[in-house]
Image (cartoon, grey):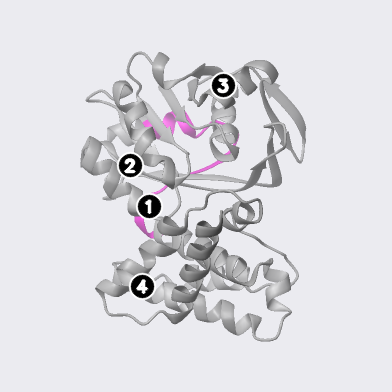
């Protein structure tokens, strides 16, 4: 299977590297700065097990040739419009596109551009970041990759994707209910991002502060009410596990959006929080805590 990994940041770099190491034909589509960096130093993985370096196949939009069987999109959501332009020449009638982005708005965007039959569901769970020299740093052993048809019909095309991905040295989950997995990932990451960005700290600091637990539970409840109104069929055991994970004061957690904010980078405010508010408005839901988070993020973006 010919695979194009759109992006070679922490997510794309890690999972693309594991696919390449497993013998898959993987090409990384990257921008000029990342292209030069990877050409010079290789793709470096720093994991709890040690450091590995590989020489990846690279392409830039101007040099992209041929069609791909699977395109995995791993860029930040605010870069999606440009990436759709970049990958368009690589899309054939048989190509499948698997986005691994935060939120859910990107699914409709990709379907409108390339067709509903081309987009499949995907998400990952990994604690990883890029180091100062562009190395991919996996901070914990967690490295799960979920995928499946959005309508639950995992036909022969999806079976072929699973055959390519399942032996790539990561924990793969071929799901027949990927939409619920996507809703639950959004519940987790948006709650985490909201409380960390609003309080400017990690969950341990928040939970040990006066009113911190009430803040986290209030944000969680608002988001759960929104995604339920939007079609999420609540799985109580799953949502309880998410809240339990977030509410553990012994484990300090932060979101990628918070880490980007503290470094002065652009953030996925509209895609992670703003889209929730649009959906809440559609159902006349009161979301005062999310509103406060959104104002805080907008002020940050104005001040960048």
Give the residue drawn at x 52%, y 18%.
58
Give the residue drawn at x 36%, y 27%.
86
> What residue is disc 2 on?
120
Locate the N terminus by quadrant.
top left
- How far, Cα to Cα, is label 1 from label 2? 9 Å
Secondary structure under tag 2 reads loop
238 relative to 261 in the view: left or right: left
Magenta span covers which residues?
Answer: 161-181
Q: Which callout, 2 or 3, points at the residue further toward the start of the chain? A: 3
- How far, Cα to Cα, is label 1 from label 3? 33 Å
Q: Position of residue 229 (x, y in %)?
A: 30, 73
Q: Position of residue 96 (x, y in %)?
A: 31, 32
In the rendered image of this protein, does residue 13 appear above or below residue 233?
Answer: above
Which numbered disc, 4 or 2, marks the residue closer to the eye? 4
- How far, Cα to Cα, is label 2 from label 3? 27 Å
**Residue 69 visible at all:** yes
- Disc 4 crowd rating (10 Å Cα; few below 14, some 14-19, many 20+) is many
Q: Which callout, 1 or 3, points at the residue further toward the start of the chain? A: 3
Q: Choose top left, top right, bottom left or bottom right for residue 110.
A: top left
Q: Do the CB atoms of the residues marked 1 and 4 lie less than 8 Å apart?
A: no
49 relative to 86 in the view: left or right: right
Q: Do the CB atoms of the residues marked 1 and 2 lie less than 8 Å apart?
A: yes
> What residue is disc 3 on?
35
> What residue is disc 4 on?
226
Q: Which mark is residue 178?
A: 1
Which residue occupies the extreme front position in the image? 303
Secondary structure under tag 3 reads helix
């Amino acid at each position: 299977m010919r695979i194009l990994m759109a992006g070679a940041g922490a997510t794309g770099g890690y999972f693309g590297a594991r696919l390449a190491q497993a013998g898959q034909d993987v090409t990384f589509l990257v921008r000029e700065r990342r292209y030069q960096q990877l050409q010079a130093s290789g793709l470096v993985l720093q994991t709890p097990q040690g450091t590995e370096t590989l020489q990846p196949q690279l392409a830039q939009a101007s040099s992209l040739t041929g069609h791909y069987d699977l395109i995995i999109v791993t860029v930040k959501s605010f870069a999606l419009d440009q990436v759709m332009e970049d990958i368009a020449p690589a899309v054939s009638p048989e190509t499948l596109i698997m986005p691994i982005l935060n939120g859910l708005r990107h699914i409709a965007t990709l379907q409108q551009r390339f067709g509903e039959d081309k987009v499949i569901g995907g998400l990952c769970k990994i604690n990883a970041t890029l180091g100062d020299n562009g190395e991919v740093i996996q901070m914990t052993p967690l490295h799960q990759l979920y995928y499946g048809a959005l309508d639950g019909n995992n036909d022969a095309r999806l079976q072929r994707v699973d055959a390519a991905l399942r032996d790539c040295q990561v924990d793969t989950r071929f799901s027949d209910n990927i939409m619920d997995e996507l809703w639950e990932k959004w519940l987790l990451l948006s709650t985490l991002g909201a409380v960390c960005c609003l309080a400017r700290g990690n969950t341990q600091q928040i939970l040990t502060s006066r009113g911190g637990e009430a803040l986290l539970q209030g944000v969680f409840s608002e988001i759960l009410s929104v995604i339920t109104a939007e079609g999420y069929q609540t799985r109580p055991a799953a949502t309880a596990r998410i809240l339990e994970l977030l509410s553990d004061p012994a484990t300090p957690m932060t979101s990628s959006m918070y880490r980007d904010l503290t470094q002065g980078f652009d953030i996925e405010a509209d895609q992670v929080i703003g889209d929730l508010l649009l959906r809440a408005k559609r159902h006349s839901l009161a979301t005062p805590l999310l509103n406060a988070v959104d104002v805080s993020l907008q002020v940050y973006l104005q001040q960048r």
